[in-house]
Image (cartoon, rainbow, N blue to C red):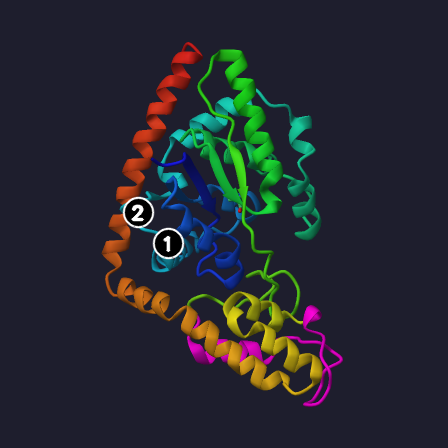
Amino acid sequence: MKKGRILSGMRPTGRLHLGNYVGALENWVALQDQYETFFMVADWHALTTGYADTSSIKEDTRDMVIDWIAAGIDPERSPVFVQSHIKQHAELHLLFSMIITTARLERVPTLKEQVRTLKLSETTYGHLGYPVLQASDILVYRADTVPVGEDQLSHIEVTRELARRFNSLYGEVFPEPQAKLTKFPRLPGTDGQRMSKSVGNTILISDPPPVIKKKLRSAVTDPEKIRLGDKGHPEVCLVYTYHGKFNAPELKEIERGCRSGELACVPCKENLSSKISSFFQNLRDRREEMEADPEKVERWISEGDDRARHVAEETMEEVRKAMKF
Ligand code: TRP
């Protein structure tokens, strides 16, 4: 017996980095055993901030889906599909947009944050509606569980409010979904800031070993530890944080060596680099196989689309009936 139904999604950002993996993908893979799972490429959501240049969306979608499957998402068990291929999301988005106020959406903190960090001089109508589209993604599958990072909690709150509002106006159609937070804290990028493609401080899960090695060589460490013999502070070192994830068995020994000064940063980074490389060896192999058979990836997506569309249309039939259309 499965515990319930999960829908989650990512905007198409191309090849994924360690932060995406630890913060989301790894969790998705594990959840397939316990839940009925649907995984979506949120390509319409990519337009909310990147509408001017759509040239890379298709390729980024493909690259991301290959990473999902290479990491262990099983497309036979979990439909993997593309948001823009399922028009029912757009219909539900429109209906939801009628029953939520603009004042409510203006209060969503992620909107203000994006305006600030991306230095947007104005907000589009679609960007304001970002959480309404996300609510439609979730509720069109009547998912009850949504694995997301902490930054998405305000969107799940909007989703719950829309489900309640719809149900009280027109009759019970939707569950009130719960967010399911990932346990591992966000991995920093190699410069110590939040790991992000736009910052350029990522290590990709598909990076070949020499690239991982090179990127780690320039990663920031404890500024007070310059050479062998200097006593380090692992709690401020991102290389140590990575060891915690990818090299847990040696963590105690690394901490001791760092604090005492016996372990220098260069060998510590080289050790980590080989641990990360072997952690993702299988993933790189599977990725290579898939690259050699591009039609197979297309087929998985199109089968995922069909399965998703079937469920979404069933929900929309109930929605139209409840609203007397
Ligand atoms: N907003 C999510 C993010 O940026 C992506 C997303 C779109 C999503 N639709 C979703 C996540 C539905 C979970 C459920 O990470």
> Looking at the image, which is closer to me, 310 or 47?
310
Name the residue carrying label 1. Answer: 65
> Looking at the image, which is closer to me, 183 or 131?
183
**In the image, residue 214 above or below residue 207:** below
Residue 201 in sight in this render: no
Q: Residue furthest top?
A: 324
Please state the extent of the stretch shown in magenta in the rendering.
207-236
Quadrant position of residue 142: top left
Q: Residue furthest bottom?
A: 228
- The response on whether ligand 1 sits within 8 Å of label 2 is no
Count of numbered marks: 2
Which SS class for mark 2? helix
**In the image, residue 221 above or below residue 120:** below
Cβ atoms at labels 1 and 2 below 8 Å apart:
yes
In three-dimensional space, the C-alpha distance between marks 1 and 2, rounded to whole angstroms, equals 8 Å
Q: Residue at x 69, y 27 (%)?
A: 103
Q: Which mark is residue 188?
A: none
Q: Residue at x 45, y 55 (%)?
A: 26
Considering only order in the chain, which callout, 2 or 1, is on the residue closer to the N terminus? Answer: 1
Which SS class for mark 1? helix
Q: Residue at x 55, y 24 (%)?
A: 162
Picture coordinates of residue 222 (x, y %)? 71, 76
Q: Which quarter of the figure is the N terminus placed in?
A: top left
Q: Which mark is residue 301?
A: 2
Side of 270 where 56 appears, left or right: left
Task: Give the residue type that dot 1 points to.
Answer: Val
